[in-house]
Image (cartoon, grey):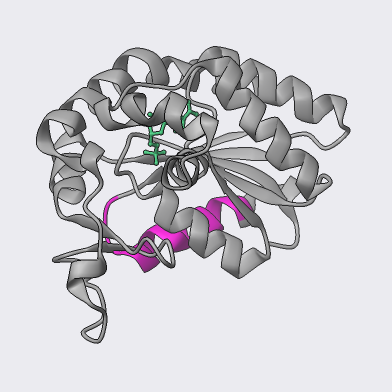
Amino acid sequence: MRIALFGPPGAGKGTQAKRLAQAHGLTHLSTGDLFRTAIRERTPLGTRVSELLEAGELVSDDVTNGIVADRLETLAHGDFVLDGYPRTVPQAEWILAHLADAGAPLDAVVSLRVPDEAVVQRLSRRRTDPETGAIYHLDFNPPPADLDADALVHRPDDEPDAIRHRLEVYHQETAPVEAFLREHVRYFEVDGTGTLDEVQGRISGVLAKDRGLAGI
Ligand code: AMP
């Protein structure tokens, strides 16, 4: 199964992509994680994109499509869940064509709907474990008690000004992708509010109902 999770920052794409990956044996492919790893490892790509990430701006389509192409090549067309990609119409056009050319088209896009106020509330309390990639919310999904709280990271782009900017970018640049995806690929909308289990159940529910995705 090859799917993409779509939705605003803070919709829960990363958390749900990890859960889907684990439940269904998919590779989790997050462009945000690939960029953050490059920044942490101080690669030339990391140097190129670090200011953009900090400011909540999008990385160029060429660079982003390039890292996705590299990563997909290493997967040899195995199953995957895309998280945070595609985010622009040129990215969406490119990935659909690229996968179709490879004879392994994208099966579906699942869009997580979460209101802006909930996004701000979620991201300002989000913390990440840089070792494991685990994502926590200090109130709703707190880190385990035996974890060193000082080792958790509050992403610089989860500061209030950057969150507001990322939401603006989403509404201006990313939301129009929805119309394109609706037209060209099976597209499902899911309520992204509620507990992690509830949202996961809704995602698995729509995928299971879709006849083409037998086996999930
Ligand atoms: P995320 O972890 O998905 O919220 O992504 C964090 C940041 O990485 C974004 O705010 C962008 O700066 C960059 N980024 C991630 N995915 C993309 C993408 N598909 N296109 C452009 N920039 C991206």
The quadrant where residue 86 appears = top right
Magenta stretch, main secondary structure, is helix
Which part of the image, by quadrant, shows the C terminus? bottom right
Q: From the top left corner, tell me how far across and down residue 204 is, in percent.
A: 54, 59
The total number of labels drawn is: 0
Q: Is residue 38 visible?
A: yes
Q: Nearer the viewer, residue 143 or 168?
A: 143
Residue 145 occupies which quadrant of the picture?
Answer: bottom left
Residue at 14%, 47% (x, y): give it: 124
Viewed as shown, does residue 130 lie left or right of 43?
Answer: left
* Relative depth, front residue between 130 and 8: 130
Q: Residue at x 63, y 57 (%)?
A: 208
Residue 195 forms part of the magenta stretch: yes
* Residue in view at x 77 percent, y 49 percent: 75
Could you tell me residue 55's position as x and y percent?
A: 25, 26
Residue 48: x %, y % from top left = 45, 24
Q: Quadrant of ligand 1?
A: top left
- Hey, which residue is sitting farthest bottom in the picture? 146
Question: Residue 101: x percent and y percent?
Answer: 86, 24
Q: Residue 90's image quarter?
A: top right
Q: Is residue 145 above or below residue 159?
A: below
Residue at point 46% right, 63% down?
A: 201
Decide whether residue 35 is among the magenta residues. no
**Which residues are drawn in magenta?**
193-207
Q: Is residue 185 visible?
A: no
Question: Of 25 and 156, which appears nearest the observer?
Answer: 156
